[in-house]
Amino acid sequence: MQCKECGYRLWNIQSRTCPECGKDFKPSEFDYVPSSVAFCCPHCDQSYFGTDERGHLTPRAFECVGCKRHIDMDEMVLRPGPGYEERQAHQSENPWVERKKSQSSFLAWIKTSWRAMMRPNDLAKTFGDRNDCFPASISFLFFNNALITLLGLGVIIVMVGMETLTDSYRNNHLETAAGLVALLGLCAMGGAFAAFIVVSIWAMLTHGALRVLAKPEGNFRETFDCLCFSNGVTFITAVPICGLYGLSWIVGIWWPISAGFMLAKRHKVSVGRAMMAAWVFPIIAVIGLGGLIGYMVHTVQKQISNMATEMVSTKDVGQAILKQVHDDNTIGPDHVLRLLLSDELGGIWEWQLADNSPTNWGSGFQEGCNNISRVFDVQSSDDSVAVYKKHITDALDQLPPLEGPGYRFGSVLFLYNKVTTDKLDPQLWLMVVWPRASQPQTVQVFFADGRTRRFDVTKLIDAVDEQDALRRKLELPEIGSLDAINIRPIPLLLSQTNMMMDFEHYDLSKALLAVTQDDGNIGPRHVLELLLSRKVATALFDDADKDDWNSFNTNNNGMGNWHDQWIYQARKQQKQALKQTLASLPPRQGPGYRFGQMVMVYDGIAKDKLDDRLWLAVRWPRNYAPEQTRIFLADGRMIHVLARDIPRLLVEQDQLRSELGLPRIEDLSRIPEVTLSIPDVGGGSANVQGGFNMPVPVGSHAEAEDSSDAHGDASSNQDE
C-alpha cells in the first residue's frame, strides 16, 4: 500500500492524499490478497475484509453495522489483516507499471514478458487502475516490439553492414555506419507501429466477440490491455537470426492462448468463451492471408503464363515456314523439327516452342524431343551431332502423310497443312500458340501475310468458326477445335541424352525374335534374360520419366530391385540365383506379362507361324499417361502411335489373335506382372546418360566373370 508517486506507505491514513508528496489516492486503485486487508470504518473503526479477486469489498458501498452510517470503500482506512504483513497483503505488482521503482525498463520488460508466457492469470490481476494501466500497456507494446525487431533483425543488418564497413574500396565509413543506425531505427519503429495497428484491430474484434459470447465486466481498454501485455510472449523471437524465422509459429499459437486467459480473468468470463473471442482475429487473419497469397500466386502464374507465350517466336518460325515452298506449291516442312535441325530459324531453339508453365519450364514436348537443342552444344562432338541429326531425320522420314489442318509441337499449333502459295489469304492462320500446361489469358496467332497478332483466349475460340468458314472457301481442312489437334508421333528411339548408346540395344523386336524356346515359341522365359545378357537396354522398361526416355537413380520403376546398374553391382552368386529363378519359371497363361513400363505379349507365338502384324511388346506405363507410345511388331519394326488410338488398334489386334488361335490381350493395364525375387544390390547409379547396361567389350573381365567361377566371392563390385 505505497504511494505510486513517492512510495510512501499509505496504511492507517484517513485522508485521501499522500502525506509525503500530496498525490491523491484511493484504496480501489490497489489490488490485495483476498481477506488479507482490514477495511475500517472511518467513523467507528469497524473492520471489513475484501473477498473478491482483487481483495476489494463486495459490495463496495453499504451501511456500517457498527455506527449505521453509509460508507464507501474509498472512504475507509486500510490496515494489514491479523497475521498478515504488508507485503503479504498487497498482490504482486505489474513489473512494467511499477518499473520506476526498479529503475530498469529492460528488467521490467523481462519480468512482464515472462509472466505473460507462464503466468497470464497472475499478470491480469496486476493491471491495477485502469487509467494507469492503459498508457502502460501501450508503452509496453511499443517497447517490446521495437526491442525484438532490433534484436531479431538487427544482428543480420549489422552482419551485412560490417562487410560494407570493412570494404577497402569504401572510404566514407562514418556515412555507412550512420545509414545502418538509421536503418535499425526505422526497422524498430516500423515493427512497433505495425504491432500497434494489429493489436488495435484485434482488440476491437475480440471485444465485439466478447460482447456477443458473454457479458464482460470490463471495457474496451481492459481488452486492449490484455492483448498488449500478452504480446510479451513474442519476446522469444528476439533470439538473433533464428527467432523471427524459427519461433514465430510458436508465438502465433501462444499469444492468443495467453490473451484468452487474461481476458477471462479480467472480464470475469469463462475461459472457453474468452479463448473463442481471442482466436477470432487470428483465424480471420490466417484465412485472409491465405486467400491473399492464393490470389497473388494465381495472378503471378497468369502473368508467367502470358510471359511464356511471349517467348514463342511465332514470327521467325512463321517466316521460315513461308519461305519453304515445295514442287506442288505447298508451304512448310512436314514437321518443324526439320527447321530446328537445319538451323534455318537462326537461333530459335525448341524451348522457345515449349509448353511452359510456372511448374514446368521449357518442356511439354512428346517423348524424345525435350533436349534437341543440346545436340548443338559446343561441348558436343561433331560425330555425336551428326548421329543425332541423322537419327531424327530418319524418324521424320517415316512420318505418314498428315491429315487434317495441322499438328501440335510443344505449345504451338502448326496449321499450314495442304496450304499452297495461291491460298495464302491474309486472314488465314498458319500458327497458333495454344499451351496446355499453362493457361494464359492471351495467345499469339501468325497469319499468312506475315502478321502476328495477340488474341484474348475467349475471343480466339469464337474466331475459330470464322477461320473455318475461310478454310471452307479455300478448300482447306477445317480446324474444328484447337484442343483436338494432336502431335505427330515421331518414331524416335533415342533421346539426345542416350544417343551415344548402341541402337541395337533398343531394338526390342530383334532381341525377342532372336530367341526360340524348346517348344518352338519365340522370346525368352522373361525379358530379364535379355537384360542379364546385355541384349537390350534397361531404359526400355524404366517406368520413371514422362518427358524423356531416360533412367533415373532409382529402383522403383516397376521393375522390382532391377535398375540400370544392377548387373555391375551384383555378385556372381546373386546373378546365378536370378538366372536359376528365371529358368524355373512355370508356363504362363494368357498373352504375356508386364515388366516396368513394357507389356510383353509374345507368349504362345510360334516361330514358324509368325504374322508380321502381331504385337510383341507395347509401351504402356503405369506411372503416367503418355501422349504417344511404341508398339514392337513381329516384322521387326517399332511403330509410334497416339496413346488414344490404342483401344481401336487393340480391337484389331485381338481379332487377328483370335484368327491365329492366340490369347487375346483385351486390356493392357490388366496384364499381370511375373512375381520374381530379384536380389537387392543397392540403388541404381547416377548415370542418366542413357540408363541401361552398357555393352561390355568382348574379352573384358566382366564378360569373363560370367563364364568362370575362378574368383568366387571375390567377384564383387570392385572386380567387375
Image (spheres, rainbow, N blue to C red):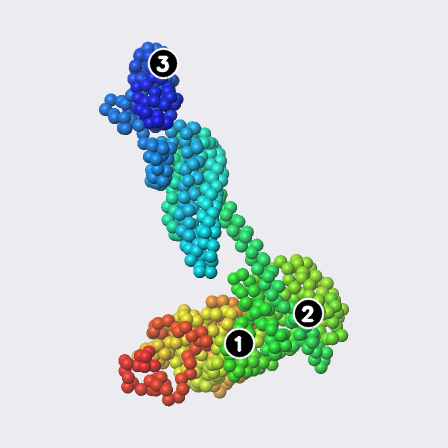
- First of labels 2, 3 by sequence position: 3
Residue 406 place in picture, x, y as percent: 65, 71
Which residue is depicted at the point 71% across and 65% down? 467
Q: Nearer the viewer, mark 2 or mark 3?
A: 3
Which residue is depicted at the point 47% across and 60% down? 169
Residue 122 place in picture, x, y as percent: 34, 34
Residue 377, labelled with which disc?
1
Which residue is depicted at the point 58% across and 74% down? 489
Q: Residue furthest bottom?
A: 699
Real-space CA distance between mark 2 and mark 3, rounded to the nearest whole angstrom: 101 Å
Element type at mark 1: loop
Callout 2 crowding tier (Cα within 10 Å): few <14, some 14–19, many ≥20: many
| Lateral position of residue 119 relative to residue 221, left or right | left
Residue 63, labelled with which disc?
3
Q: Are marks 2 and 1 in contact (CB under 8 Å)?
A: no
Amino acid under disc 1: Asp
Real-space CA distance between mark 3 and mark 1, rounded to the nearest whole angstrom: 101 Å
Amino acid under disc 2: Leu
Element type at mark 2: strand
Callout 3 crowding tier (Cα within 10 Å): few <14, some 14–19, many ≥20: few
Find disc 2 in the rendering and name its residue. 430
Give the total number of marks visible in the rendering: 3
Residue 139 place in picture, x, y as percent: 43, 36
Callout 1 crowding tier (Cα within 10 Å): few <14, some 14–19, many ≥20: few
Using the image, determine if residue 495 lies above or below residue 427: below
- First of labels 2, 1 by sequence position: 1
Amino acid under disc 3: Glu
Using the image, determine if residue 71 lies above or below residue 218: above
| Lateral position of residue 586 relative to residue 437, left or right | left
Real-space CA distance between mark 2 and mark 1, rounded to the nearest whole angstrom: 30 Å
